[in-house]
Amino acid sequence: MTRKQILTFFAMGLGILAVAMDITAINVAIPAIEKSFKTDVETIQWLVNGYILSFGVLMVTFGRLADIFGRKKIFFMGLFVFGLSSLAGALSTSAWMIIAARVIQGVGGAMLWPSIIGILYSAVSENQKSLAGGLLLAIAGVGNAAGPLVGGALTEFASWRWVLFVNVPVCVIAGIITYLEVGKQEVQEGKSDVDYFGIVSISVSLVALLYALNVSPSWGWTSYKTISLLVIFALFMALFLIVEKRKDDGLIPSDVMGNFQFMIAGFVMFTYIPGFFAILLYVTQYLEKFLNYTPLEAGAVLVPMLVFFSGTSAMSAKIYNEIGARLAIFIGIVLSVLGILGVVLFGLNSSFYGLIPAFILCGVGLGFAVPSITTAGISAVSESRGSLAGGIIYMFQLVGGAFGLAMATTIFTDLAQNDLIKRLSDSSLNISKSELSEITNFVVGSGSSQEILDSLGQQKFDTVFAHVEHAYITGVSGGLIFTAILSSIGAVLAILFIKSKVDNSPVSG
């Protein structure tokens, strides 16, 4: 690689690192933030939800704008918005102020991610695209892995505010290197107008969908509020598709929307990624609730998976070029499915060491599959659509993760509650309605074991807690098996429809 390419990768890597680390680091700091502002879990969860909503909804829009106006310009705007909102969040004086800052951070992240993908892929030759994808995802994996550790250390030894402060110098350094070393990124051919209708319609549609998926486990899928949000999603998405098909150069141009290889790559990502999201959520909760791990310790348990994800991603380019996209994706998904099943069969109800083999399988699988799916998708469209394609692939990842996690959570809740009620009914324990409510809230919600202990007393608590743990494992196993089945569908789609070598020439509409 040339000096300019190395510096380009370094600058873009800093941007990726800031976004990826921020996603996981803030989770560890949430209890401290909640305590600092004396707020509740339902309010403070919007630190995560608000970020994901703005990030996921605007990804496609800024990917398209980067291709129209220049990726370097949108990248600089993203650094400014992300860095300034991080500073505002660190200086927040109320819960709603930091939540607002996190929503704006998500906007900055939505500017950065597709711009980075477009800049990296346009900076290398066709044979180096898989290397670019592998390094991009490797850095993201390092950021995800380091996030809980850095966030935990900063929160414990300094303040939760430093979790946000640290983004500012990273953005400044990335901006300076990009200004000096990264060339102009004007790749859009011809004149293109901003598709305001497309931006508004797809944004409303995705906000409704992501919000519905986020709240469906608590509201229920048959709630009129959930159904109303899904109807809004369907109506605006249908409107978007009908109008966009009539445009030659809309928000998602016809040569992208009608590109079969690109859309298949997106659907494979949609079906594959929920297992990763489910493991991040349920395994850490299990460790904290039943094995008494601290949030920092629970985050550290995930490090082997994320390290192998990063390491494999960095090496996946050579294998991708040797065996092609189809087999690289298929092998990655199969390894991940085996890892998920390993967590179900051997990892739960065990120590940290019992989880390691399954986590390694998941990490290696992610390292094969995610960069390969991304590269296959972006390589299927012309280079001038690179940022848009990268944004859409990542949107498939976020929406797939949200959908899969919502479905898995529904399965988890039903199985866990039914198993708990059955086991308590079959026992000789006399559990009141209020006690059952506290126990259920601990299993499927945010209750604490101390509340159950205070309510039941030590002798009764020891017997009940064994039933509680069994119910939790039953629910988690069902949710994870669902994600494994969903991932297997992705493997079938990949082996049937993904081409081994993808043609990146422009596709006519």
Image (tube, helix red, strand yellow):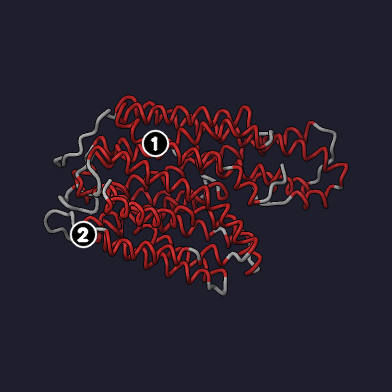
Q: Residue at x 55, y 39 (%)?
A: 304
Measured as percent of width and height from the top left, residue 348 is found at 65, 34
Residue 204 visible to the viewer: no
Between residue 203 and residue 279, name the one nearer to us.
279
Residue 95 visible to the viewer: yes
Label 1 residue SS? helix
Q: Residue at x 83, y 52 (%)?
A: 454
Vertical placement of 26 versus 348: above or below? below
What's the mark number on residue 284?
Answer: none
Q: Which residue does the numbered mark 2 point to in the structure image? A: 184
> How far apart are the two marked residues, 2 and 1, measured between alpha carbons?
29 Å
Q: Amino acid at mark 2?
A: Lys
Q: Quadrant of the N terminus?
A: top left
Q: Amino acid at mark 1?
A: Met
Q: Residues within 10 Å of mark 2 (few under 14, many from 20)?
A: few
The part of the image, by quadrant, that contains residue 77 is bottom left
Q: Which residue does the numbered mark 1 point to in the structure image? A: 315
Measured as percent of width and height from the top left, residue 322 is found at 30, 27
Q: Residue at x 52, y 47 (%)?
A: 145
- 490 sits left or right of 387 in the view: right
Between residue 184 and residue 339, name the one nearer to us.
184
Q: Residues within 10 Å of mark 1 (few under 14, many from 20)?
A: some
Measured as percent of width and height from the top left, residue 346 is found at 63, 28
Count the numbered circles shown.
Answer: 2
